[in-house]
Image (tube, rainbow, N blue to C red):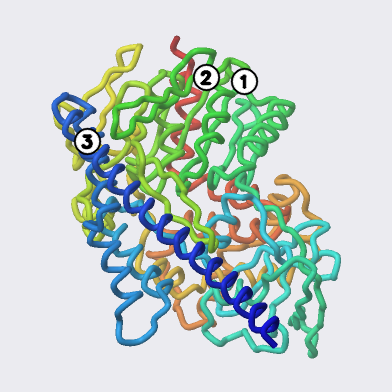
Amino acid sequence: MEEKKENKRRVWLGVAIAVGLACIVWISIGIGRVIENYRTRVIIEHLSNQIGTYEDGMAEFATEAKALNDIMSGNDKLLQTILTIRNNYVDPIPLDTLYEKAIPALLSELDPHSEYIPAKMFDRVNESLEGEFDGIGIVFNALTDTITVLNVIPQGPSDKAGVRPGDRIMLIDGQEVAGKGLAQDSMVRLMRGPRGSKVKLSVKRGALDKYVDFTITRAPIELHSVETAFILDKEAGIGFVRLSQFSRTSYAEVREALDSLSEQGMKSLILDLRGNGGGFLDQVVKIVNEILPKGDLIVYTEDRHKQRINEYSNGVGGYHDIDVVVLVDEFSASSSEILAGAVQDNDRGLVIGRRTFGKGLVQAQIPFADGSAVRLTVARYYTPTGRSIQKPYTNGDEKSYQMDLINRINHHELFSADSIHFDDSMKFTTPKGRTVYGGGGIMPDIFIPVDTLYYSPYYNKVWDGNVLYRYTLDFSDRHRKELDRVTTIEQLDSLLDGCDLLEEFIAYAERNGIPRNDADIAKSKEVIKAQIRAYIGRNCMGDDAGFYHNIYPVDDALQRAVKEIKRGNAKIKR
């Protein structure tokens, strides 16, 4: 009996010793952390006091040290607030819910381009620049409140399933989508999904009474930033490339387009960046490399510490000797402005159009573990002559920033170059002595106003009422077999030249409630004819060559570019 009691005492003594040792270790660690935090604060305070006596950038380091000291000593109000809510709020609340609201609120007090991207939006925000998404492989339009297939990507999921241009998608997985007023984003979400998953489409085809059903397996779909590339003027050897954005594949696409045009006899290039909102810096640098000789400055960035990073051309490009014209407008931004500025400041060619957007802030993307990210402005872009691309803004005032374009319209800037005024301090000089202007955006060498000469009450009715576009779909339906056989611009011209499109359209408009008005039609007929041909052209050939070829006669900027090239004004001046 005594032996059992002795064994129990030994067991309990061992447990007590173990617990005691654990407590000592725990207390020691706690005391060690307190001492370490205290010593760290003392060191930081000492550094702050010492560094604060120096000038220039050392004072900023002292501020950073003080901020670190505040966090460690519990003086950071934001951190304190978060900890207080987590520990003391009356009801349990997921902090992530607060973060989703607090982070955007914080960033909204900075510049207009610093932003928070929630995890659920991350892939969608980035996919256009990544050059790929998972989907079914169609190009469609829904202007008539019905998804109309304009083109099917060759060898894509829809092409393999049998979907054809002109098909109207009525049901998606049994859900009615035609005539329901769905936003285009909602339509896209219904058709997209993870690769390997399936979606069922029910389409109306031609005059068939019953819907045609397709089960399509989603797959990776390439996004192309070069919308079209073709020889615009064969006699003069003028090539045309339309670039919609600077994605990860843009340089490869542009280089492929230039090589193809060169084989067709290209001597001059018109690069259309109108509406191009920018993208990846490395892609624009590579594209500019193709046309600049070695050693020319393309762009430089400068951060808050005045640290400057220069990007120079490396001389390995293959198109240093062709004439270049760049087309821009008020929606050309960021990388588009870098390219236009590099061409202009290096006297490499002409920039034609209207003053660009003025987005010259550099964002760094900081990812979080949950898949969300912050895009934080960390530097500014400058053109080779030292012009800041960024237009003026006030931190925390995004509304005024977004109203800038409206203000430009109200001040008639889009309609007259005389409405644009630059202070003398905004003047810069290129190596060849040309005057260029800073102050935000790139002011083109040749200004092209928004054209309103073709407008008339009749045109406004057929355009605003979507009658013109609906007619092009009707024509494409009636001539689908002929359009499917079109593979070249010459074949498209031959088909359209054999039809009296204008008179046929006027009759169509009358049947849709818009009476004929010969005076208005005489004023607007050229733009009506060009747009009819262009939108029909978009229904064939697999890219936008048919569109831009046919819109050319009423595209003032494009026509001016051709004239300047033929006059020799886009020649290299080096």
Q: Quadrant of residue 505?
A: bottom right
Query: Closer to the camera, 176 or 111?
Result: 111
Q: Position of residue 156 (x, y in %)?
A: 79, 60
Bin the neighbour count of mark 3 within 10 Å (Cα to Cα): few under 14, some 14-19, many 20 and up.
Answer: many
Q: Position of residue 491 (x, y in %)?
A: 75, 49
Choose mark 3 or mark 2, whichever is in front: 3
Kind of element beneath mark 1: loop
Image quadrant for the N terminus? bottom right
Query: Closer to the camera, 85 or 443?
Result: 85
**Is 89 on the left or on the right of 322, as rendered?**
left
**Is 297 on the left or on the right of 497, as rendered?**
left
- As measured in the structure, the alpha-carbon distance from the residue carrying label 1 to the one carrying label 3 is 46 Å
**Badge 2 vs badge 1, beta-carbon distance below 8 Å:** yes
**Badge 3 vs badge 2, beta-carbon distance below 8 Å:** no
| Label drawn at residue 62 | 3
**Vertical placement of 210 versus 451: above or below?**
below
Q: Is residue 567 visible?
A: no
**Vertical placement of 113 versus 460: above or below?**
above
Q: Position of residue 498 (x, y in %)?
A: 70, 57
The residue labelled by disc 2 is 313
The residue labelled by disc 1 is 317
What residue appears at the point 52 percent right and 65 percent down from the top-left corner? 119
The amino acid sitting under disc 1 is Gly
The amino acid sitting under disc 3 is Ala
Nearer the N terminus, badge 1 or badge 3? 3
**Is 103 on the left or on the right of 261, as rendered?**
left
- As measured in the structure, the alpha-carbon distance from the residue carrying label 2 to the one carrying label 1 is 9 Å
Kind of element beneath mark 3: helix
